[in-house]
Amino acid sequence: MAFLSAILPMVMGLTIVMATDGSECPGEGRFPDPNKCGGFMDCIAKKAGGFSVTRDHCNGFVYNATSMTCATTPCGSRRERSVTNDFHPLSHLCESQPNRFLCANCKTLVHCVKGQALVRQCIEDFYCTNKIGFGGAVCYPDEPDECMCLRPNEIRVDPYDPQRFFSCENVGSQPQSYKCPEGKEFDESSAQCVNQAGFSECVKSGTFANTQNCGEYYSCIPLRHGWLQKFFMCSGNQLFNERSKSCEDPCALKFVCQHEGRFPDPLNMQHYFECFMEFGQMVKLRYQCPHGYMWSEESFGTGKCVEATGEYADYPFAHCEIPDDYCPETDPCLQNPCFSGVTCTFTSMAPFYTCGPCPAGYTGDGETCVGLQCPVGFAGVGGDCAPDSDLDGYPDTELGCSSKYCRKDNCINRPNSGQEDADGDGLGDACDSDADGDGFNSDSDNCPLIANPKQQDADSDGRGDVCDNCPAVSNPSQRDVDGDQMGDACDDDLDNDGSVNTADNCPTIANGNQADADGDGLGDVCDNCPLHPNPGQEDGDQDLLGDACDSNADSDGDGVDNSVDNCPSVANSNQLDVDGDGSGDACDADSDNDGVDDTTDNCLMIPNPGQMDSNGDGRGDACTTDFDGDKINDVDDNCIKNPNVHATDFRQLQMVALDPQSVSTPPVWVVYDDGAEIHQTVNSDPALAIGDHVMIDVDFDGTFFIEDTSDDDFVGFVFGYQSNARFYVVAWKKGPQNWFNQAERGVTLKLVDSATGPGSALRDALWLTGSTPNQATLLWHDGSIGWTPNVAYRWQLHHRPNIGTIRFYLYQGTNLVMDSGNIYDGTLQGGRLGLYCFSQEEIIWSNVKYTCEDGVPQAMFDDLPQTLKDQVLNTSGISTKSTLGGLLGQDLDAQDPDSDANSRSVLQGDQPSIRWVKGKSNK
């Protein structure tokens, strides 16, 4: 402990007085002080009952009980609300979280108010820890363990500040705190203060390897008083060679047996190799001299172990510990790491091989190659393309490539991107009048996808017994929430969570713990206001946040109410928070909480404090093939930077009626192809079917196909959906018509920002080809063509909210028939995607795909004003994905799911219905 004499004792500061009366506490946590504006109370439960209370204040600003922070709203006069002019040394902790409670060290709580630090010292037996109920840091008794004495005669580093440490005399004794000199950190393994980078201290001038990690090195320059020490890092697999004073690849010195004999190991002179021929093969064995000895070569192929000399100390990597497996013993190309048909070449640099270019028709790095997509109007992979008449992603003729997208379309003139074929006869269900081959027409068959020639139906619900999930109980909808093949009508545990329906507070969503924070009888997982009692679950704007807790305040325009937004001042509609710290990634300086700032982190979404990057490509090893850590390889992932989205899926639809007072027919939605193909079968009121994935920068592609020949109304889609009153809608009308008001032929793009929400006013605004004050704004219209029945059209939409730019393309067959050019509107900063229909039946949206795309397409970029071009080049950059070539939305590497031929439907009361069809395919 002699080194402690050089350490500065930690100075304790002002403490906050603890009140003895806790009767005003509603429970444990941080609550507003009812007696003082801007005041708050920290209520801590006592073991003997009751609460101890610490009172503090927000320096004249209101305390926000919802966010548990000091708000920017003042309490009174300027004098009362001024933040101190003193810039406390700990204010740097508040830079990324200007209104939070943080721990500076085990005994110091920092209360950040508008970016400045108000410092509070914890009293005896209290330590700074983070508690959810307090919204962050709080001085709390006997927590955390990392700040307490758990073993006698122990010296421990402060978990919050590596410059500080404490010593313990006995278990439970008061820690004695100390602080290392500036520029140093405490190292528990050596019980000493060391340089912050972990390097040895300078004792002589020169350049030296870091013996703990020879990929790092440092220089020592003598000054009049002390040393100037600078730190450096080698790239890739290189280590610092103290003899040549340069970074070198040690594997370039790897020994290879070429002759029989004993030879020194060029990487470590304490070792030597013995080489000899056996059964016609050269064998290499490695041996080690005793400690303090080195191998001395007496003549070629002979030598012995001798006492180590100065030559040993001057060896290239003499001070480096090089693991035995640092350089490969065998050629890694033997493991076929490259894409099929790509040349593999052995190298001395990790990963010790390089792959040649991808084959013609493919793109990638040689290790992973992805087949180039065919232009619109064609299907196939890797340049092997053939016409695709119905634009569903499958060619009209068989191709030679191996992908499922090279197989001949089993229904050439009607889109069916799922290629369902229940009876396996090669004719897709979409154009097979008897899909299951049982002799009954599919339109009248009570089990259209499972053969049942006797058509038995014991419960007379219109569903044959062989496909009825409740054969003894009438249930035409076939609703089956938990997907256990037992219909809800005869399932006493709908969500399969172990709680029977009558006792389950979330009967349709599994919640084994039945948690109900607000006591309103609805479990937290199905409660749209889990902290506000609202048994009716009213949600007037259908934004999935109940009216009881929806303030309709959204400062950043991302569709997330300020009260629940994890980045209220930065638009992040997807609310990603990969480290679960309550601060969204968009406003979190260290998204994955690995101690490496996002600006330099080579794996933003996967913790990798070591930042290992074996091939030096700038992406860490931890995220080489899976950037977002969702267990889906990037090549198969629709959104490589969002672990919540990896495939297009419209199976979980929220149905939104836009004229709910109408007595007309609600729409009927039928979902195929695991959520990538949707049909709407009836002439209905204006309505939306909204998916559950939230997107920001998005590319949205799909195929329109309208089978109805008698009507001429609207088909389309929505994006940026934030509520039933705020969304973008693309709508296409076959011909002009004056009904509610004048609707022209062609495609319109509108911003819906309705003051009333669903009703006749919004309905009329959607019908009109124009803008309607306080309802909808027309952003673009092209009246050149209307849709034609039984013709496939392919759309492609780009939305980049961060630069407020939208672009729409429409293809008929192989021809580009519409290009909106850049449309500028930044009102809605992201939201959900969905489908739109208005008074039009027999619509198919097929081969639908959405992807998260940070980069801006070249054509969009070229048309941007210079200010936005500069913004793009400084942030997301230009996308490498082609746009005007009209790439099809195919998931080239998707795997075929195992599935049984069946169908199931859900009927939601007298609301629009949805049915999911899941059947055998030839994919």
Image: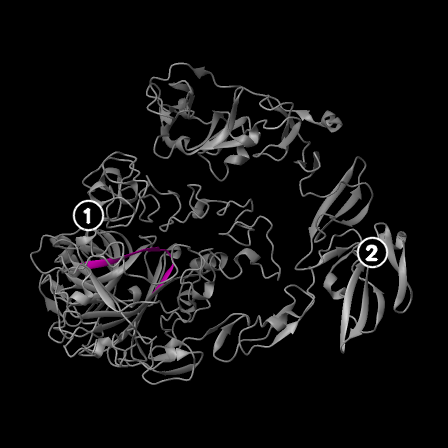
Horizontal side of 616 relative to 520 (left or right) equals: right
Q: Are marks 2 and 1 in contact (CB under 8 Å)?
A: no
Q: Amino acid at mark 1?
A: Ala
Look at discs 2 and 1 and give the one toward the viewer.
2
Residue 397 is inside the magenta segment: no
User: Where is mark 1, residue-wise?
Assistant: 755
Vertical comparison of 64 with 13: above or below: below
Residue type indicated by callout 2:
Gln
Which residue is nearer to you in this view: 718 or 122? 122
When asked about the image quadrant of residue 448, the answer is bottom left
Kindly identify which numbered label has been placed on residue 270.
2
- Judging depth in this view, the residue of 881 and 768 nearest the camera is 881
Residue depicted at 41% across the width and 14% down the height: 20
Is 658 left or right of 572, judged from the image as shown?
left
Q: Which residues are magenta?
A: 687-700
Please, what is the dominant secondary structure of the magenta stretch?
strand
- Structural crowding at the residue carrying mark 1, measured as other residues with C-alpha within 10 Å and reported as few (<14), some (14–19) or many (≥20): some
Q: Is residue 688 magenta?
A: yes
Q: Is 739 displayed left or right of 732 in the figure?
A: left
Residue 41 found in image quarter: top left
Residue 848, percent from left and from top: 31, 67
Residue 886 place in picture, x, y as percent: 36, 74
Please rate how many residues cluster around mark 2, counting C-alpha atoms within 10 Å: few if below 14, some from 14 to 19, many from 20. many
Q: Position of residue 217 (x, y in %)?
A: 73, 50
Please give the name of the residue rendered at 46% of the width and 63% of the height, measured from the top-left corner. 634
Q: Quadrant of the N terminus?
A: top right
Rendered image coloring scheme: one colour
- Residue 72 showing in the rendered view: yes
Distance of mark 2 from mark 1, alpha carbons?
81 Å
What kind of element bears circle 1?
loop
Q: Quadrant of the C terminus?
A: bottom left
